[in-house]
Image: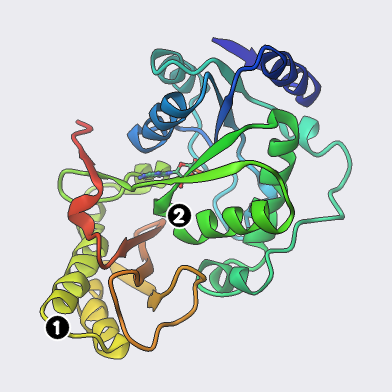
Amino acid sequence: MHELTSPQEMRAWSRAERARNRRIGFVPTMGFLHEGHLRLVDRARERSDRVVLSIFVNPLQFGPNEDLAQYPRDLERDRRLAAARGVDCLFVPDVAAMYPTEPLVRVHPGPMGDTLEGAARPGHFAGVLTVVAKLFHYVEPDIAIFGRKDFQQAMLVQRMARDLDFGVEIDVAPTVRELDGLALSSRNTYLKGDDRRAALALSRALRAVEQAWRNGEADPKALQRRGLEVLRAPDVRPEYLELVDDQLRPVARADARTVVVLAARVGPARLIDNVVLGEGIASDVAVRTS
Ligand code: AMP
């Protein structure tokens, strides 16, 4: 596995591979890799000849009171996991390489970035889209894989690629969960003691909404009430639970394409999760991690 830290070297590597007619698949991450990230790597491998995985904890997408300083990091372990999964090139730039000058110009997400996570985390998606745009310029991938776990992010990246003609296919992969339903996240490492069990309220709330919809309830307000009932569990502080379409707009009636998105705090962790009603949590990938 190659390991590169400079954007210029990254671009040169990618261009040399493309000159040999190799299709490049790209998986951007913030590291502290788990099986959710590694499934994106598998998908990139299936659909391309060379896989690039980036690890960069992007300061631009963290608010002033968020967990940038505490965000978990373990490059040694990430390197081992990436190599074992067949990553061809690990790109690990530092902050100075990514932002040699203050990034005054940013990619603005538009109205799809103002709701849900965007409302809770002002400026977050401008930070995400800006770094993804920069990474796309270095890697020049044919295809980039994002997880549906971060549904709003995946939709915004898709929209950016289309609206700004990046010429890269954005593939969205299913959420990977623990066997008990908890969606894998690097932030799950913040869950200690009883918080780990309390965090199951998120997937339980999604399942409750899914069940109510399958039983014939289509009114989004009623479904939201049902979900919040379950999400309001001991040690869980719900932030939102909404039913939206693939443009993140509230729906008038829930149907198979409706996405239930939620965010909640459990102990020191702020967690998000979602389900597409017609697919259901059961269609996500379940893995044993310990
Ligand atoms: P992160 O390192 O958290 O920024 O995530 C990097 C990529 O991995 C993003 O496209 C995420 O949506 C994706 N990802 C994170 N957790 C999961 C998961 N549990 N299942 C599927 N994809 C995930």
Residue drawn 59% across the image and 23% down it: 23
Closer to us: mark 2 or mark 1? 1
Camera-nearest residue between 42 and 256: 256
Residue drawn 66% across the image and 55% down it: 162
Quarter of the image where the N terminus is located? top right
Camera-nearest residue between 73 and 149: 149
Where is residue 212 shown, x and y percent of the image?
A: 15, 78
| Above or below for 194 versus 70 | below
Q: Please state which amino acid type lies under the numbered disc 1.
A: Gly
Determine whether the beta carbon of the residue marked 2 sits less than 8 angstroms from the nearest atom of ligand 1. yes
Q: Secondary structure at mark 1?
A: loop
Instruction: Tell me if 49 is positioned left or right of 251 in this view.
Output: right
Q: Tell which quarter ligand 1 is in.
A: top left
Where is residue 167 shown, x and y percent of the image?
A: 68, 43
State the residue lying farthest toward the front: 21
Where is residue 173 shown, x and y percent of the image?
A: 39, 44
Q: Which mark is residue 216?
A: 1
Q: Secondary structure at mark 2?
A: helix
Residue tagged 2: 150
Q: Which mark is residue 22?
A: none
Residue drawn 76% across the image and 26% down it: 7
